Each structure stands twice: as structure tokens, then as C-alpha cells.
Image (tube, rainbow, N blue to C red):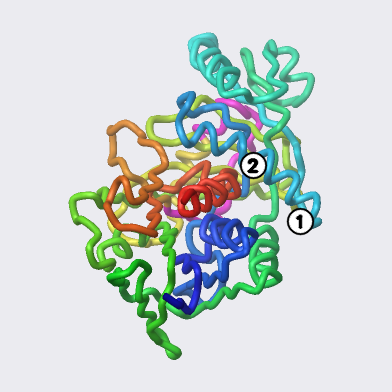
Amino acid sequence: MSFDFDAVVVGAGAVGLACGRSLAARGLSVLVLEKGPHIGQGVSSRNSEVIHGGLYYPTGSLKARFCVQGRRLLYAFLDSHKVDHRRCGKLVVATDEAEVPRIETIFELATANEVEGLEHLTGAQARALEPGLNAHAAILSPESGVFDSHGYMLALQAEIEDAGGSVVVSTPFERAEPLPGGGFTVATGGEGGTTLTTRLLVTAAGLGAQGVAARIEGYPADRIPAGHFGKGVYFRLAGKAPFERLIYPPPIPGALGTHYRKDLGGQAVFGPDLAYVESEDYSVDAGKAAEFERYIRRFWPGLPDGALTPDYAGIRPKLHGPREPQPDFQLRGRDDHGVDGLMALFGIESPGLTSSLAIGEAVADDLLHD
């Protein structure tokens, strides 16, 4: 049977574009659909732009494997495509003796995850690297960094298009139906709404993942995991950035917690926190500044009064609610839902951006294993 495309990917964020790139690199004709007016305007545009080392995730999990593999692939990609980035390193800080066992657990986990170059630091050694830091002890992860996530996504789009594929914006996915002999019909909306056929279908819709899966005929409703919106806000520092490296306290339940980064423009940004919300509300409550100040002063006592200004907010596609254990990435293929030629991604939150190239390779491997 002849198809309009070998593969259609729903969602042009970092993960969807990485999936499209991997499929196009293997000689497939690829179409990436994006409902918004530009690529990467959802989860991928509202994050910390941190390249994670792979320290925090259960050994053997998809998050652990994809983060380490994806980070290695990502640095090579950014170098070869001349996308701005800085391998600045990260300090995971115990601000008092009670937090030392927590960072020791992280060190052991990161070592099991084959994260390179880790070092134990005393408080004095950490302060020698970053004067002004309050540290009883710390872990140094030299492979962590920051990068231009939008420049990265533009480079992914360019690779798809160079391979003959297409990325179309303002084209929402409406529904899909499996065809009797294999493949799918896909209906799109927007001004140029149409119906097309594809042999393979990948859904990488971020916050909309559950809704997209529900509009694929034959996708079992009981195999669509419940989704939750985890909102995090960021505050920017008015003044000189105090540290060169990323600074992370021990994680909070369900997230990595409010951390510090010096962005590529040289400014200091703190965040995100975590609050569960019911809708895509990207407002930043200026009243949270006092709460942020108290938290930040645990590791930076010298934070001046009134120096934080509201910056932006992001929402993460979580598969767990408050006080529930944090699950792994979900890459759901035929063995899970029973639909041939379909890969559905759920819960691709942190470290999804760092992991994106590895996720793309895994999706292509799974769909093309035959």
C-alpha cells in the first residue's frame, strides 16, 4: 500500500522534533505536525534549559538511561551545529549536616548511572569554587550545563527538512484511524486542514498527550495514563549573577526543586517550584518572591532584599499527583496498546529535554525493529 508519509509525528517540541530527526535520518519520509504557530512553544519553551548529568533517576529506568545517553548525544549535536551552550558544571549542595546523607545517596545513584567525573567536595572546597555559597558539603557534576533550547530545536527542524521531511505549524492533530492493512489516516485541522495517510504514527504532544491518544481510534482508554499539570515559576535576579555553576539543593518530593542557574546571557535565574494546577495558567505571582527568598538563602545567604523579579512559568506533563511516587517516562508501543505502527509518549517531563535525542533514537528503533 502507498502512503503519503512513512511517519507522522504529533508535536514539534524538542522530543517530537528529535523523533522526526531520527526517523528521517533512517530514510523515512517524515511529517511533523504542530498545533501552535511556531515550533517548541509548549513545554520545551518554558524550562530551565539545563543539560542534566543524570544524577537523580533510578538506575535502569528510562529516565536514567536516556538522560545519560541523551546528554552525551546532545553535547556532540550542539558542538556540530554550533548551538550556544556552556558546560558549566553543577554543585548539589548540602546546606547543613542533616542534608549530607541525601546528597550521598545522590552520589551513589549517579555513580550507578555511569555519570562521569563526579567529585565529593567539603564545604570549604565548594566555597573555594563558588564564594558566597553556604555549603556543608557538595557533589560536583562537571558534565551538567545550560544551552539554547530554541536554537537546538531549530537545528533539529533543519535536519528533518534537509532529509526531505516537513515540519508544519498551525496544524493541529484532530484524529487518526488505523487502516485495515496497516498504517493510519490522520485528519488535521487549521486553515489547511486535510486528511492524509501514514505508515507510522508518533505522538509527542506534551501536555496534550492524553487528549491526542484519546482521538486515535482503537487506542484503549484504560491504557491512557492520567495526566497532571505541574506548574513551576521562575524569578530573575536584579544584579550580578553570584555563581558560575548550577546550584541545586537536594530534590523535593516530585521534582528537583528550586535551583540556580546563570543563563547564557549572564543573568541569574531561580526556579522552578512545584504547584499542581488544573489549566495552562502561565502567570507568575509576584507574592511568591518572599517564599523564594527564604529558600534561596539556605544556599546563598547574601541574596539582597527585594532583588528578585517575576520572570516566567512552565507546566510539566506529570503522571503523578501530589504525594504520589514519581513514575518513569512512558513510551508506549504495540505491546502496550495493541495498535501496530503507533508509539505514544506520556509524561516526558524533566529530564526530557536532555534526553530528547536518546528518546528519538529509541522511538525509531522500536518502530523499525521489524
Residue found 30% across the figure and 72% down from its top = 179
Horizontally, residue 52 falls left or right of residue 145, namely: left
Q: Quadrant of the N terminus?
A: bottom left
Q: Nearer the viewer, residue 337 or 284?
A: 337
Query: In the image, what residue occupies the spot 51% across and 60% down?
Result: 16
Q: Nearer the viewer, residue 56 or 265?
A: 56
Q: Residue at x 47, y 65 (%)?
A: 9
The spot of residue 227 in percent (x, y) is: 29, 51
In front of the other: 87 or 290: 87
Q: For numbered disc 1, what is the local secondary structure?
A: loop
Q: Are the residues at dot 1 and dot 2 in contact (C-beta closer than 8 Å)?
A: no
- Quarter occupied by residue 296: top right
Q: Is residue 285 left or right of residue 120?
A: left
Front residue (pair 157, 339): 339
On the picture, is 132 further left or further right than 166?
A: right
Pick out the residue farthest to the left: 222
Q: Residue at x 36, y 46 (%)?
A: 318
Badge 2 crowding class, 10 Å Cα cut-off, few under 14, some 14 to 19, many 20 or more, is many
Labelled disc at residue 260:
none
Range of residues picked out in magenta? 294-315
Task: Give the Cα distance between marks 1 and 2.
Answer: 13 Å
Query: Which amino acid lies under the numbered mark 1 shown in the image of this protein?
Result: Val
**Looking at the picture, which amino acid does disc 2 mark?**
Ile
| Position of residue 341 measured from the top left corner of the image (x, y, whole percent) | 39, 59
Residue tagged by mark 2? Answer: 51
- Does 49 lie within the magenta span? no
Q: Position of residue 161 (x, y in %)?
A: 66, 72
Question: Considering only order in the chain, which callout, 2 or 1, is on the residue closer to the N terminus?
Answer: 2
Q: Position of residue 133 (x, y in %)?
A: 68, 25
The residue identified by callout 1 is: 83
